[in-house]
Image (cartoon, rainbow, N blue to C red):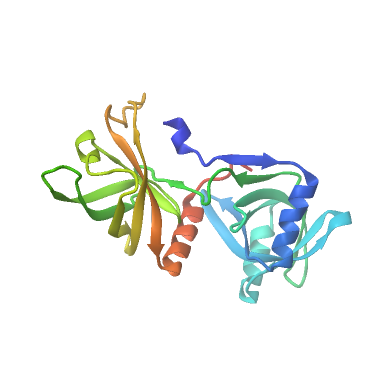
Amino acid sequence: MDQLNKNLLKRNKKDWAIFSIINNAKINNKTVVGWKMIAGKKFRVEVIFQVIRKYRSEIVVRPFDSSQTEELKKLASGTEKLNFYLPDEMVLFQTEVKQIEVSGDIIVGIPKMIAQVERRKDFRLFVENNFKIQVNFKKTNHNQKVATQLFKKSCFDISSGGAAFITSKLESKFFQTGDVIENFEIEFEDKKIEAEAKVVQLKKLEKNKSKTIVYGEFLISLEFQKMKPEDKEFLKEMVFRYSEFQNVI
């Protein structure tokens, strides 16, 4: 199960590749997230790369919204390094804070290394026991004797592109690769998201040492087919906010 619990991240130390990704974000005025952990919580500010000084190995970072100028200053104050996340490229990096300008801009170094998601379109959030995201839906089986069951399952993992949950061996008979589930509901705190989901994988799980997996259980992996753009953005934000990256960068 350990391999199931990892976003596959590829580290890249090639100067030309790093510059290309950062320069692309600057040219296209893409939103970047600056962040750091304080007392176990993730504090973040949306920024843009305003200027890149390649031969000085510097990036001038500006808040995306001028109302967050003071927040960016606070984020960069009292720290030697700052983390950045480029959502469109699924890239993370950490770099040194060189200077905080009076204008509110900050100057940081061009990173020596970036970490990028490998073989996936989205970061996954692996749901811990003290953190609950539930999916609710009705599903018809594939037996000759047709039956429909209401499922209410805790997520094993979730991203803006899909989700996974665990079923018993008996429940797994309701699912086949390619099944489309309409009226699929994702429930997180007081937020409910409706989507259409497609079953992309059924994986039989082996019992693990911590005994959190029972022999014969199945991991059902889904891909979201239809979802409102604002709900997709909500999931991206939620996954980023609650994911832990400090061991990656």
Image vertical order of residue 237 relative to residue 205, above or below: below
**As drawn, which residue projects farthest toward the bottom?**
67
Does residue 33 appear in the picture of this structure?
yes
Total numbered circles: 0
Point out the residue furthest to the right here. Answer: 55
Q: Quadrant of residue 129?
A: top left
Q: Is residue 208 above or below residue 121?
A: above
Q: In the image, 230: left or right of 12? A: left
Can residue 80 be seen in this snapshot? no
Q: Quadrant of the C terminus?
A: top right
User: Is residue 84 depicted above or below 175 in this figure?
Assistant: below
Quarter occupied by the N terminus = top left
Across and down, in percent, residue 14 comes to: 77, 43
Measured from the top left, where is residue 131 in percent x and y? Answer: 36, 48
Q: Give the residue at the far left of this rendering.
A: 145
Residue 48 screen position, x and y as percent: 68, 66
User: Residue visible at 53% across and 51% down?
Assistant: 121
Query: As drawn, which residue projects farthest toward the front?
Result: 144
Q: Quadrant of residue 54?
A: bottom right
- Could you tell me which residue is drawn at 69 percent across and 52 percent down? 79
Horizontal and vertical percent for residue 156? 36, 43
Q: Nearer the viewer, residue 221 or 35?
A: 221
Compared across the picture, whether 39 is left or right of 202 comes to: right
Q: Nearer the viewer, residue 242 or 8?
A: 8
Q: Which residue is located at x 58 percent, y 60 percent?
A: 44
